[in-house]
Image (cartoon, rainbow, N blue to C red):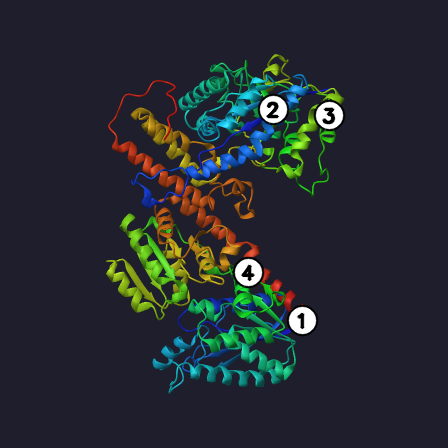
Amino acid sequence: MRVLMFGWEFPPFQAGGLATATLGLVKGLLARGIEVTLVVPFAAGEADVPGLRLVSTAEPRTGLRSIRVASPLQPYAGAAEYLVLSERGQGPSGGSIYGANLFDEVARYAEVAARIAAAEPHDLIDTHDWITFEAGTRARAVSGKPLIAHIHATEYDRCGGPGNPEIHRRERAGMLAADRVISNSAMLRRQVMNQYEIPGDKIDVVHFGIDTGRESDQPDALPMAAGRPTVLFLGRVTRQKGPEYFIEVARRVADHVPPAQFVVAGTGDLLPRVIERAVELDLADRVHFAGPVQGPDVDRLYRAADVCVMPSVSEPLGLVALESLRSGTPCIIPKESGVAEVLRHAFRVDYWDIEETANKVVALLIHRELWEELSELGLKEVRAPRLGLDRAAGKTTAVYQAVV
Amino acid sequence: MPDLCLYYQVHQPYRLGRYRVFDIGTGAGYFDEDANRAILRRVADKCYLPANRLLREMIEHSDGRFRLALSLSGTLMDQLEADAPDALESFQGLISSGGVELLGETFYHSLAALGDAEEFQRQVELHRRAIERHFGVRAEVFRNTELIHHDAIAPAVAGMGFKGVMVEGADRVLGGRSPNHVYRSASAPDLRLIPRNYRLSDDVGFRFSDRRWSHWPLTADRWTDWIARSAEPSVHVFLDYETFGEHHWAETGIFAFLRELPEALDRRGIACVHPSALMSREPADLLSFPTPTSWADVERDTSAWLGNRMQRAAHERLYRLGRRIRAQGDPILLESWRRLGTSDHCYYMSTKRFADGEVHKYFSPHESPYDAFVTYMNALTDLERRCDALPPRAPAPMGEMAVAV
């Protein structure tokens, strides 16, 4: 089977869940002997990055063809974020009206997709989130092959509400047009059914797998043994990820564990407000803003941390939790999240419950036995086949086969 | 025909409520009084009251031929007295029928036998007084928490005047011998050991409502046929009392099974015996328990309570604190400490097969074993601080009475 996939590679400065998820899927599919033509947008000015950035250099390359399309499209671009990028000069020049250029770019990308679909032989088209949905539908118009819409997160998740109506409309149109929708989690499937009125019987749930076969996955020595206890937030500093809750938790934790320090890794529109709040709470010398991190620095951060806290308001999956556990770092996840459907060996909290989150962070920092138990069993859990790339690829293949 | 020795364990712990690190030092209570009261009421209505009524009828209709043993933990008796006096009266009525023998155990259903030998004896004594007070009887036979037994425990049990102990008929202990005999303890020769027949027990305790089981639905006739097959002197079936109506709901037919039991036994000529009646039987052999054995989980050891680091840390911290609290002598702190010693708290911290949503999770009031640990350690920290804050006092006399906290 040959799959024409409109996916994502790692954006330059942040290992986002969407890129990791699609690339993990590609890796799993290749290992099962499925041929993949992966089409990804990449920003002009990044052209010097050699080759496709997969998870490691030791990937099976047989069966993979990659096509990069020069485009400023970003995986998490909502209209507002896109505008910020434009102003910074990272987007297309002359960004004018709110979000207008984003949709122009999506349309331009879809034109290219149609040309690729005409040239590249394939049996099936797979897309990942709304920005690629139009590319997928245009490609199908050319080739007539079945179309899959992978949904990783919706505008509703990103905005904590209905969000941009045009994006919402396009998400819905993309999922309606697809032959099958594959959702990251049961939670997201429910949301897609309720907020987008997509019939449940066309949505399959495939929790995506995590790559644990990498050399760098050996956990370091117990980090709490040395230095100050460290609590990590990693993710976009946007309302969806709940960075403000993290700062409030930090205050409560610091009251009980004075040497504790906190790291906020990532950037986003809430960063100024979060920094201000940290200063207000007299945490300026304990909260470190690491900015966007990439590559090996991400793994280093996980390993240096004693606890990773994910206070996401909305988390259709929650790759950070899996990555944290892969590094042997216990994590605290939202009860309402995709990972909560699959992970047993992680603390669960309501994202808004600052007291309870702080209670758990403190416990992890002061009770070594708790830390060791969660670290060991969490690591074991993410290494289990249940959360492996092959299981996810297998389930996805089954969906493909049903429509081809 | 073998005799049948039936024993049911009746126990409820004081479950902890939410107790966060920020609650330490605030005077907040550790235990979830509302939840404990609600659970007790539910279990009383679904299990204790109907099962007591049924057993009493069965005993009376059989002219006393149907008989069994019960053991009630002290934490259960205290909760019944406070919150379900109707159920306590119902137990009193059942026990006064004469068909029920009561066993001795630690008042707090604790792991004291593994943590503190002196405390173990005190808690057994407290339990002895409690069953005398509520039921006017004295136990001759002992059951330790969850049938935990060990050669090191046997002499202490014999020293307290018990003639026998209920133990788990674990394969590794029996080494090919049958559980359907009375044995002599290898470490206390005067003490008799009554091993549980776990297969026949689990048929009722676990498999009864399992529709995938080839023998479902289990009838009293079929089950007593299996007992009748034994050419050995006595079959020992030990279960949680909550099996009736709580673990298996009434809709599964568990009460009908129980009701049909006396006649099914009679038809096959199987007699019921009390554990104390087995004390005069000739022991088949010496039985040694070189390592602690219990009736919990497939491992049948103490790993259900002390299997992981968190559990061991909590257990050790509890007993370290216990020595200080006893020396300090404050009865309120002591009572709190002892309630924290109930084995269920450690059981909730088990991570064994947690990922499969196993039996530990089913019984736990906590979201996860990790939450159980955090709550427990926060409560212990608070108790330690309360102990630190009090001036030292003379130790209380042996067997101080329980007080409400």
Quadrant position of residue B110: top left
The dot on residue B264 is: 3
Please tell me which of labels 1 and 4 falls first in the chain: 4
Q: Disc 2 marks which residue?
A: B195
Q: Circles 3 and 1: CB distance less than 8 Å?
A: no
Foreground residue, B38 or A310?
Answer: B38
In the rendered image, residues at marks 4 and 2 fall on the same chain: no
Q: Which residue is mark 4?
A: A186
Where the C terminus of chain A falls, by quadrant?
A: bottom right
The answer to whether marks 3 and 4 mark residues whose Cβ atoms lie closer than 8 Å is no
Q: Chain of mark 3?
A: B
Mark 4, chain letter? A
- Which circle, 1 or 2, is nearer the viewer? 1
- Pointer 4 and pointer 2: residues touching (CB < 8 Å)? no
Disc 1 to disc 2: CB gap under 8 Å: no
* Whether marks 2 and 3 lie on the same chain: yes
Q: Amino acid type of disc 3?
A: Ala
Look at the numbered disc 2 and give the secondary structure of its residue: strand
Give the residue type that dot 2 points to.
Pro
**Which chain is disc 1 placed on?**
A
Looking at the picture, how far across and down is residue A207, in whole percent?
55, 61
Residue B381: give x, y in percent of width and height: 33, 38
Q: Residues within 10 Å of mark 4 (few under 14, many from 20)?
A: some
- Mark 2, other Cα within 10 Å: few <14 / some 14–19 / many ≥20: many
Characterize the local packing of mark 3: few (<14), some (14-19) or many (20 or more) Cα atoms within 10 angstroms: some
Using the numbered discs, state the Cα–Cα distance from disc 2 to disc 3 in whole angstroms. 23 Å
**Residue assigned mark 1:** A403
State how far apart marks 1 and 4 are (Cα).
21 Å
